[in-house]
Amino acid sequence: MYLRETRRRNGDGSVVSYLALAHNERDPETGIPKAKIIHNFGRADTVDKEALARLVRSISRFLDPAEALQATSASDGEIEVLDSRPMGPAWVADRLWERLGIGRAIFQVAAGRRLEAEAVERVIFSMVANRLSVKPLSKLAGCSWVAKRAFVDNLAEVTDDQCYRAMDFLLEALPELQENVFFSVANLMNLEVDLLFFDTSSTYFETERLEDELAGDEEDDGDSETEEEVDEPLEEAGIRRFSSHSKDHRRDLPQVVLGLAVTREGIPVRMWTFPGTTSDQDIIKKVKDDLGAWGLHRVIWCLDRGFNSADNRRYLTRAGGHYIVGEKLRSDQVEAKAALSRQGRYRLVAGNLRVKEVRVDDGVMRDRFVICHNPERATHDAAVRANIVAELSSRIAGSDTLSATRRAELYGKLSTKAVFKRFLRRTTTGKLRIDKAAITHEAHLDGKFLLRTDDESMSAEDIALGYKSLYEAERGWRDLKRTTVNIRPVYHRREDRIRAHVQLCWLALLVLRVAEIEVGDTWRNIRSELDRMHLVTMATSKGTVSQRSELTPGQRHILGRLELPEPPRFFDFTPAPDEDPAPAP
C-alpha cells in the first residue's frame, strides 16, 4: 500500500497532480501488477496535509517508535535512529514526585547539609523510579538502566557510588524527610488521618553465598549485576535475625520485620524497619511514639488480631488515642467468649455484612464489642470444615483394629496439624473419634469476626467498615513484596543500607498509590500504557534531536486524570558540527 501521485496536463499547458491511496494487485490472467485505488485525496495542492499527518501518526502507533521513524524517514537515509527508550512511567512519576513535595523536601534537607541538592535528589528519584519499572533492579543494575534503558529527566547516568551515598543521605535525613513528605501529601490530598491502619510483615535476605555469610567469610567479589552491594559478613546481633516466626515461611534465612501505616485511602504514611525478632509490644510503642512526635496523637488505630493484647491496647490510648482491634474467635479471653455468647439482633450495614454490638459489662469495661457476620463467608467456612472432617474421617477409618500403641502414634501424627486436632478426640479407651461437639461449636463461628474498640464516637457500622479497610495495609504489602515494587530480593547486609532500601520502596509505594487513586486504575495497567511512550534520538543532516513519540488516547486519559500537561515534544537538539548553531525546536 502506498501514496500514488498522478499528473494531468491541462489544455493551457498547466500540470495538476492528484493523490490517492493505492495498492498493487496482480492480474490473474496476465500476471502483471496493476494499481488499485483505495481512496482519492484529490488535488495535491489542495489536499488536507494535517489529515495526512494524522493518518501517518495513527499508523505509527502500531509500530515501535524506532521502526515508525525509519518508515517515515527519507529514502536517502538522512535520518538515523540512534536510540529509543521508554519514558512514560518515569516522566509521570517525576511529575507526581514534584507535586507531592518529595523533591522539594530532599532539596531543603540536602541544602542544610551542604550537599549538591539537585544531584542527590535526582539519584534518589532514579532509584525510586526503577522500583516502579516493569522489573525493579539492584542498585548496580539500576545504573545501567538509567544510562541505557530509561529516560530520567536531568539525569543521563549514575554510578553505584552515587547511589550508595544518596542512600546514606536518605537514612540520615529520614526523620525530617518523612515528616515533611507526610504533611505535604496530607495537605495536597486532604487526607483524613483520624483513622490509621497499621500492619506488619517481614522480608528475608538471600544471597548466592549464604553459607559463606554464616561462616563469617568476608570475601565477596560482588561483581554480579543482579546483586546489591555486599557490605560485610552477616552478624547475628545486627538487624537481620533468624526467627522461628516468618510470614514468608523462610525460617532458614535471616529476616527483618517491617511496619506500615496507611490512611483509609491506602496512602502509606510511614514505614519502619525492625530487627527480625522484635516483639509486637516494642513495635507498637515505637510506631505510636514516632507518629505522636508529628502531633498525631488523637487518632484511632486499626490493628489486626496479632496486636491484640492488654499492654498494646493500653499504650495506644495514651495521649487521647483509640483503637479498633480484631479479637480471636477461639481465644481464651473471657470478654470475647462472653460477647459471642450474648444474644442480639443483627442489622445489615453494607452489601451482605451484618453487625450487632455487645457490651459485656457497662459498669466496668470501656470497650465495646462488634460482632460481624458475612453469610457468604459462613457458607465457605462450612464447606471447608466439611472437607476437613471428611479427610480426617478417612484417616482414622479402621483405626479401632490397631493396637493401642499404633493408635497413639496416629493420634500424635494427626494432632500436629491444627486443622485436624480441632475436630479429633480420643475416647476413654483410646479410640479415635470425630468431635461432634467441636463441629457444633465451630459452626456457631462461621462467617463471623469479632472487633473490640474503646472509641465511643463511632457507630457499629463505622467500626466494622473501618476494620475492613485494613485491607489497604494488606494491599500495600502485596504491592511491596509480590506484584509491583518488589522489595525482594535484598542482598544488603549493613543495617543502614537495609533501612535505606526499605524507605526507597516506601517512596515508590507512595507515588504509585497516589497515581492509582487519581487515575482509578492499577499501577500495572497505568505503567503498561505509559511504557508505549518513547523518547527517540535521531541523527539528521542538521544535528541530533530527541523527540517524544505521539501520545495514545490511553496516555492522554492518564495525563488528564492526573491533571498533568503533555510532555514536551522535543527534549534535546544538538546542531551538526559543520552547521551553524540553530535554536532548539
Image (tube, helix red, strand yellow):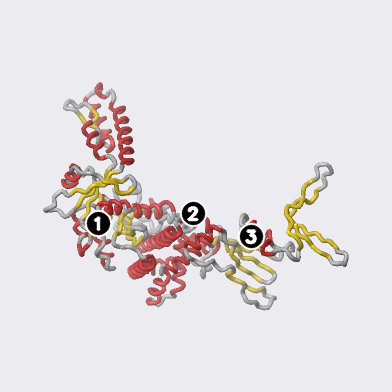
- How far apart are the alpha carbons under marks 3 and 2? 23 Å
Outermost residue on the front side: it is 11
Considering the image in quadrants, where does the C terminus appear?
Answer: bottom right
For label 1, the SS is: loop
The residue under label 3 is 57
Q: Amino acid under label 2?
A: Asn
Relative horizontal placement of residue 29, taking residue 234 as reference (left or right): right
The quadrant holding residue 427 is top left
The answer to whether the residues at label 3 and label 2 have Cβ atoms under 8 Å apart is no
Q: CA distance from mark 3 to mark 1?
A: 56 Å
Q: Secondary structure at mark 2?
A: helix
Q: Which percent across, then down, holds residue 299?
A: 26, 62
Residue 267 appearing in the image: yes
Question: Could you tell which of marks 3 and 2 lies nearer the N-terminus?
Answer: 3
Residue reaching furthest left?
A: 363
* Place of residue 161 in the rendered image (x, y in percent of width and height, measured from the top left): 45, 67
